[in-house]
Image (tube, rainbow, N blue to C red):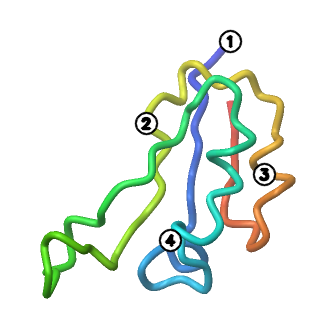
Amino acid sequence: MGKTKIKIDYMKCGPKGKVDPRDCAKCLKVCDPCVFLRHEDLKFKEDNIYDPQHWKITAIWPSICTLCFKCVELCPENAISIRV
């Protein structure tokens, strides 16, 4: 079995996307093995470092993905794709 690759389209989900990960986070809630991490996007210079406004979701641990595809099904912007 090959390596699982999880791609998130940041033009749909993230600082430049239609959806703010802080408001949605459906992939985080549905993922039983906790593959995803929501974090501050370090590419943006924040006005207030104690209250960051630019967030993104990253698939940090794709190797523990169970290939249930719940995250793909629940993403309102179809921003997640998984392939093996």
Residue 83 appears in which quarter of the rendering?
A: top right
The residue type indicated by label 3 comes to Val
- Residue marked by disc 4: 10
| Mark 4 closeness class: few <14, some 14–19, many ≥20 residues within 10 Å | some
Q: CA distance from mark 3 to mark 4?
A: 14 Å
Q: Secondary structure at mark 4?
A: loop
Q: CA distance from mark 1 to mark 3?
A: 20 Å
- Above or below, comparing residue 17 to residue 49 in the picture: below
The residue at 76%/61% (across/down) is: 75
User: Residue 72 has which mark?
Assistant: 3
- Above or below, comparing residue 59 to residue 66 in the picture: below
The residue type indicated by label 2 comes to Ile
| Mark 1 closeness class: few <14, some 14–19, many ≥20 residues within 10 Å | few
- Residue marked by disc 1: 1
The residue type indicated by label 4 comes to Tyr
Q: Is residue 12 left or right of residue 41?
A: right
Q: Are marks 4 and 1 in contact (CB under 8 Å)?
A: no
- Residue marked by disc 2: 60
Marked residue nearer the N-terminal end (2 or 1): 1
Residue mark closest to the camera, 1 vs 3: 3
Q: CA distance from mark 2 to mark 3?
A: 16 Å
The residue at 68%/30% (across/down) is: 84
Q: Are marks 3 and 4 in contact (CB under 8 Å)?
A: no
